[in-house]
Structures are given as structure tokens and as C-alpha cells.
């Protein structure tokens, strides 16, 4: 549901405010939020469970999980009693959706043992007391000797003698045996109960059976299989009964998902220190101290540099953002789009305050990607996405564009970026953040355009990126400095600085670039560096090697490869 809301955010202010009100109600009552989260941990995937029931694939554990989920969900409305929650969360209708399912949940609880086996044909599913006939068969299977012994005691009491014995063989099965000496003492057949039927006469005894003993013999012989069969059919009947509640379970799943999403947003607001945004359909975007929700979660708390956003409604609707690499331009663009998106799904947002108008779409052209399998280069994909934005964006849209025109020559790229800016300003008139290294675009003039840059402090050779937005245009891109930070060899960085300075011509003319100086010859007493200092790759390979998964032959091949490479360096 979270993904569905992010893909299809709300555009009606009333719907957005209703969600925000529900999130705020949970956010303000932290004990209730904690209790709610505890109950939801005992609610399983109801959509999956209902599908398994409907398809006849649910096992005992699935039905048990369904019953537990319904029981846990039915406890939630009591947590949300009172006018405050009724007004904020009553539209979810959780109470009415659990009421119709308590019966089947109780039925499942009565029928199934606490921990059913995975299979449904091997028995051990049904609780004692649910089916009287199953209980009788189970007693036979589990206590056959006890059942026979109790019957023997009944016949002994009726016969008035302890000499009656119980025996068994393969031919006769279970039988009663009376000694010949006892019969001779009584002198006639009246000593034998009338319901006894003679089965076998021996020298010293006679063997008899009864209808009840024969029935017990049959039941005991087939008790285990009969128990499994009876349990299997009892489970199938219970599962078929649950099929009639599938639609109700799916409705409950929808309500639980809504509530789970709302409490998750409330928890995110609690952990991240988010605020409730306000909406005005005719307003632009006004965000105070906005933050990137993902980036700030990955750095020490308080380390993220917040920035304001002002677009439209009295401020410029198009901000041309310049600044060096790593200064935070892309983060600023993305966090603005994310704040707007979160607000439109009814979430609190990472900012000190946010006053927003309703947008009809968020259009992004950020990052580098390609589709080589279809013959589309990175630049072609960039232009395709840009074309889509220019065709669809309206004055109610938010557009973020990052480095348009960078995939071609400087002249072509600048021309394309300039034309795109003009189109957005004059025709689309969308709320736009346009990040670029083309400082020449600052010469554009339009009442809706403003310039901003990411602030940088230079102290000799040291450059500090403050990640802070300021008015104006960046003076430099600091690309060579970023290359040095990335670990580009010092001689390459030095040569790049030489070329950059030589290529700078204030008159606009062509400047000849001097050839690089020849490398000085190595001194005669040159000493080879330490092996592992010149072979950092080996350290990296050793650190990344998973010895637990490598076979002996793979390990041998790696060592041979490393040895060969080291010999080549010596």
C-alpha cells in the first residue's frame, strides 16, 4: 500500500488533510502508537492468507495465522476509542470489518491445535474435544491396550472371575480365553456368557470372541489410518467454511494496511522529527529548512545541512541552481521532490515548516542511464526524458532537472539547456529547479527566474563545500578539486590545473595549451617502493576474498594470478 500511495499520490486537499489528521492523531499519542504497533506485529499477511484459502492451498498454520490475525486486529478498535481517534481514524472502518470475522476465527481456534504441522494429511491437526468420533478413534490409536484392558475388566466383573484372559494372534486377532479347569468346575455351558462366541478349543482352554471385541479389533487395526482420514476431512471442511469469508478477510486486509501505513508515517515523523505540512490549492512551494529523508538517516544526527525552498506565489517559479560538484545541488533537487511527494500521500515531512500548493505531477530528469540494448545512449535517454517533461508539464507541476546537456559537446549542451529553460519559462511555466554547471545560463532574463548557488569557502588550497544555498551564481565548478578528492593521481590533477589556467582567456580568444613538461629521469640511486605499497590492488583483493566459499582450485588460480602480476611489476 505504501508503494501504491507513492506511485499514485493524492491531489484532493480534503483527502490529503484526512490522512494528515490520522497521522497526527497517532503522532500525538505515543503510548497508543506503541500499543498499536505491538498489535500489528501479530497480524500476518492477510492478503496472502486469503488467497491461499480461496485457492484451496491453505494448511493448518495458514488458518491458525488467519485466526490470530483476526483476533489481534479485533483488539485494535479498543485502543482507538474516544472522539479524538474516532474523528481521525473512523473512516478506516476497522471495527466493522473485524466484527464479521470473529466467528470463523473462534471456530478455527476451537478446531486446530496451537502448532499444526505443515502437512494436512498426516494427522495431528485437530484439537481434542472438537469431534467426538475423532476423539474416540484417537483414543484407540493412542491407548489401544488401555481400551482393551478396561473392556476385559468389564467382562471379568460380569463373569465373576479373574481367570478370564485376553490374547491375540494373527489368525484370530483379539480373543478372550477361559481355562478348561474352570469350565469343568462349573460343569456345564452356563458358565459361558451368552454373548461369547466360541472361536477355538484347545487342550487346556477355549477361546471366545464378542461383537464388541471384534469391533474393537477392527477399530484398533485401522485406528491410525482412520484418525488421519477423519482429521483430513475435518480440516477440509473447516477450510471450505473459511472460503466463505475470503471477501471479508480481503476487506480487513485493506483496513489493516491503511492503519499500518498511517502508523508507519507517524513513527517516521517521530523518529525523523518531521512536521505536518499545510496546503493551499493556490499556493506555490514554501519549505523552511527542508532535508533529504534518506541522506539524513545515513549520517550522524544533526549533520545534515537544511535549506529553504521558495517557488511561486510571490517568489520566482524557476530557480537556476549553479554550484560545484559535491556541493549538494542534486540532493537539494531530490529532497524538494521527496518532500512534495510525501506531503501528497498524507505524510509529515522532513522540514521545519512546509506550506504547499497541490501539484498535478512531479517530473524529474536526474542521474545518468542508458538503454544500450535498444540502441539508446545516455544522452539519448536524457533527451527523451526531457522531451517528455516539456510535452507534459503544466504550471501546476513540479519539475527538477539536473545537468541538462552534459552528454554532448559544451556548445551543443549549452544551446540545448538554454532552449529548455526558455521553453519551461515561457510555455510550461512549471515550478522548476534547474541545476547546471553552465553559468552562462545566468544571462537569461525572465520575471519568473531567480538564480541560486551552493556556497563554497576557499582557504588557500583548501575548499569546503558548505551545502548551503545562497542567492547568485557560482563562480567556479571545482571539478579538478573533486578529482583530487576522488584519488586521481597528483600528476594528473596538477596537469589539469595547468591546462585549466592556460585555457582561461578573458578576451574570449583561442589560447594555445602548452605541452606537458618532460618527466625527470629517475636518479641512479632510485629505490623500488615496497611491494605492497605499489600493489594496493592485492590488498583490496585479499580483503574482498570470501575464503569460505572459494574452492581449493579457485584459491590456487587466484594465487597464481597474483604471483604472475607481482612478478611483472618487479
Image: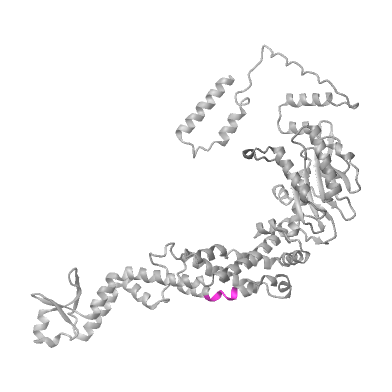
Magenta region, residue range: 98-103
Q: What residue lies at 66% left-to-right and 62% top-to-bottom?
A: 261
**Magenta stretch, overall SS:** helix
Image quarter of the N terminus: bottom right
In the rendered structure, the answer to whether residue 374 lies left or right of residue 332 reads left
Image coordinates of residue 87 in percent, x first then y, are 73, 73
Which of 530/38 is in front?
A: 38
Residue 153 visible in the displayed image: yes
Left/right of residue 120 with respect to residue 252 in the rendered view: left
- Determine the residue positioned at 19% across, 73% down: 167
Q: Is residue 258 magenta?
A: no
Q: Is 509 placed above or below 471 here?
A: above
Q: 322 above or below 140? A: above
Which quadrant is the C terminus positioned in?
Answer: top right
Residue 507 in the image: x percent, y percent? 91, 26
In this rendered view, identify the residue nearer to me: 171 or 279. Answer: 279
* Front-most of residues 539 and 452: 452
Percent of width and height locating residue 468: 82, 45
Residue 7 vs 201, above or below: the answer is: above
Residue 262, by quadrant, is: bottom right
**Above or below for 194 versus 132:** below
- Identify the residue at horizontal 68%, vertical 68% (top origin): 32
Which quadrant of the view contains residue 68?
Answer: bottom right
Task: Point out residue 407 in the picture as x, y percentages from the top left corner.
Answer: 74, 35
Q: Is residue 17 left or right of residue 54?
A: right
Q: Say how many tags the image has.
A: 0
Q: Quick check: can you spot residue 437? A: no
Amino acid at each position: 500500500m505504501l508503494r501504491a500511495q507513492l506511485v499514485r499520490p493524492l491531489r484532493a486537499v480534503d483527502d490529503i488533510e484526512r490522512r494528515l489528521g490520522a497521522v497526527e492523531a497517532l503522532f500525538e499519542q505515543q503510548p497508543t502508537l506503541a500499543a498499536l504497533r505491538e498489535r500489528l506485529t501479530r497480524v500476518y499477511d492477510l492478503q496472502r492468507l486469503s488467497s491461499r484459502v480461496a485457492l484451496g492451498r491453505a494448511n493448518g498454520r495458514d488458518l491458525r495465522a488467519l485466526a490470530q490475525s483476526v483476533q489481534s486486529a479485533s483488539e485494535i478498535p479498543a485502543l482507538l476509542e474516544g472522539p479524538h481517534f474516532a474523528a481521525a481514524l473512523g473512516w478506516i472502518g476497522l471495527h466493522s470489518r473485524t466484527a464479521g470475522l470473529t466467528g470463523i476465527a473462534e471456530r478455527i481456534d476451537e478446531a486446530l491445535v496451537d502448532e499444526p504441522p505443515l502437512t494436512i494429511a498426516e494427522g495431528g491437526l485437530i484439537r481434542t474435544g472438537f469431534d467426538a468420533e475423532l476423539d474416540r478413534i484417537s483414543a484407540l490409536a493412542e491407548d489401544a491396550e488401555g481400551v482393551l484392558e478396561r473392556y476385559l475388566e468389564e467382562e471379568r466383573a460380569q463373569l465373576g472371575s479373574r481367570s478370564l484372559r485376553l490374547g491375540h494372534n494373527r489368525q484370530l486377532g483379539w480373543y478372550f480365553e477361559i481355562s478348561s479347569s474352570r469350565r469343568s468346575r462349573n460343569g456345564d455351558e452356563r458358565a459361558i456368557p451368552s454373548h461369547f462366541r466360541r472361536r477355538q478349543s484347545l487342550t487346556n482352554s477355549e477361546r471366545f470372541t464378542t461383537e464388541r471385541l471384534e469391533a474393537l479389533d477392527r477399530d484398533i487395526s485401522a485406528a491410525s489410518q482412520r484418525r488421519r482420514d477423519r482429521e483430513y476431512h475435518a480440516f477440509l471442511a473447516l477450510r471450505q467454511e473459511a472460503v466463505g469469508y475470503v471477501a471479508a478477510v480481503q476487506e480487513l486486509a485493506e483496513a489493516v494496511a491503511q492503519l499500518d501505513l498511517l502508523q508507519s508515517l507517524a513513527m517516521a515523523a517521530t523518529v525523523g522529527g518531521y512536521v505536518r505540512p499545510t496546503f493551499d490549492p493556490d499556493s506555490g512551494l514554501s519549505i523552511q529548512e527542508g532535508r533529504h529523508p534518506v541522506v539524513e538517516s545515513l549520517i550522524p544526527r544533526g549533520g545534515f545541512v537544511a535549506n529553504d525552498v521558495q517557488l511561486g506565489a510571490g517568489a520566482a517559479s524557476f530557480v537556476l541552481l549553479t554550484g560545484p560538484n559535491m556541493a549538494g545541488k542534486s540532493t537539494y533537487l531530490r529532497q524538494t521532490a521527496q518532500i512534495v511527494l510525501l506531503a501528497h500521500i498524507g505524510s509529515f515531512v522532513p522540514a521545519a515548516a512546509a506550506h504547499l500548493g497541490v501539484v498535478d505531477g512531479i517530473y524529474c530528469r536526474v542521474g545518468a542511464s542508458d538503454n544500450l540494448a535498444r540502441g539508446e545512449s545516455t544522452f539519448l535517454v536524457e533527451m527523451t526524458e526531457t522531451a517528455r517533461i516539456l510535452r507534459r508539464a503544466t504550471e501546476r507541476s513540479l519539475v527538477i532537472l539536473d545537468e541538462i546537456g552534459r552528454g554532448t559537446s559544451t556548445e551543443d549542451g549549452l544551446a540545448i539547456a538554454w532552449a529548455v529553460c526558455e521553453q519551461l519559462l515561457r510555455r510550461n511555466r512549471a515550478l522548476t529547479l534547474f541545476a547546471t554547471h553552465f553559468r552562462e545560463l545566468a544571462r537569461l532574463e525572465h520575471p519568473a527566474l531567480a538564480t541560486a548557488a551552493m556556497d563554497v569557502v576557499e582557504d588557500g588550497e583548501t575548499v569546503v563545500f558548505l551545502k548551503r544555498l545562497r542567492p547568485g551564481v557560482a563562480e567556479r565548478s571545482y571539478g579538478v578539486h573533486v578529482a583530487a578528492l576522488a584519488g586521481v593521481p597528483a600528476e594528473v590533477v596538477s596537469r589539469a590545473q595547468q591546462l585549466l589556467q592556460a585555457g582561461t582567456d578573458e578576451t574570449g580568444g583561442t589560447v594555445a595549451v602548452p605541452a606537458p613538461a618532460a618527466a625527470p629521469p629517475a636518479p641512479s640511486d632510485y629505490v623500488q617502493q615496497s611491494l605492497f605499497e605499489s600493489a594496493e590492488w592485492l590488498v583490496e583483493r585479499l580483503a574482498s576474498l570470501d575464503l569460505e566459499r572459494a574452492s581449493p582450485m579457485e584459491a590456487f588460480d587466484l594465487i597464481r594470478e597474483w604471483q604472475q602480476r607481482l612478478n611483472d611489476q618487479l
